[in-house]
Image: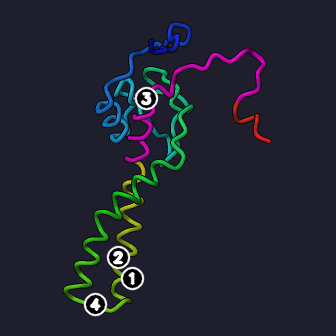
């Protein structure tokens, strides 16, 4: 017999969309739940809640996942090209640094926001917005550090 959590107590006021829909909406800076509101209010700051459906997106903490995804993708895209250029043309090191470092920096910066939106969409789909029914007056997680 498999254990299933009691979802009735912390039931969400909305139905989470499919994984691809939620991630795609997040990548496009749209609320993963309704697809209408925005995910970000600054470059990388997540809005406290969706302006349209009131989903509490500010509760989601993407932390280190978006930079990891971006570095992984950009590295896998550009490193083979760097090796190919080195092997076939053997340019001087200063030229490598003048071309590849700015290219890596620009690509990572451009892809960071869509990656964070995608991670927020993934977290919505995986149920990270479900309410935790903690007893009233209990210390919150961020207050328990010590």
80 and 111: which is toward the camera:
80
For mark 2, give the secondary structure. helix
Q: Which residue lies furthest to the front in this view?
A: 1
Q: Mark 4 points at which residue?
A: 91
Q: Residue at the location (45% across, 12% down)?
A: 1
CA distance for labels 3 and 1? 41 Å
For mark 1, give the secondary structure. helix
Q: Name the residue under label 1.
A: 97
Q: In this view, does 99 lie to the left or right of 51?
A: left
Whole-percent x and y of residue 41? 49, 40
Q: Eyeballing the image, is 107 above or below 68?
A: below
> Tag 2: Cα neighbours inside 10 Å, few (<14), some, or many (≥20)?
some
Tell me the tag on residue 100: 2
Q: Residue furthest top?
A: 8
Q: Residue at the location (39% across, 73% down)?
A: 102
The quadrant in which residue 74 appears is bottom left
User: Which quarter shows the C terminus?
Assistant: top right
Whole-percent x and y of residue 137? 78, 18
Q: Eyeballing the image, is 115 above or below 74?
A: above
CA distance for labels 2 and 4? 12 Å
34 and 12: which is toward the camera:
12
Tell me the tag on residue 126: 3
Q: Which of marks 4 and 1 is nearer the N terminus?
A: 4
Q: Earlier in the sequence, mark 2 or mark 4?
A: 4
In the image, the segment drawn in magenta is: 114-140
């Amino acid at each position: 017999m498999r254990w299933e959590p009691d979802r009735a107590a912390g039931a969400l006021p909305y139905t989470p969309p499919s994984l691809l829909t939620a991630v795609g909406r997040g990548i496009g800076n749209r609320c993963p739940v309704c697809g209408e509101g925005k995910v970000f209010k600054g470059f990388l700051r997540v809005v406290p809640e969706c302006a349209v459906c009131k989903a509490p997106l500010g509760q989601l903490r993407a932390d280190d996942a978006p930079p990891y995804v971006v570095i992984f993708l950009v590295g896998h895209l550009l490193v083979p090209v760097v090796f190919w250029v080195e092997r076939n043309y053997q340019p001087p090191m200063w030229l490598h640094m003048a071309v590849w470092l700015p290219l890596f920096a620009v690509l990572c910066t451009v892809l960071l926001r869509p990656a964070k939106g995608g991670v927020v969409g993934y977290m919505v789909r995986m149920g990270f917005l479900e309410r935790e029914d903690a007893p009233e007056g209990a210390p919150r997680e961020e207050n328990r550090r010590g």
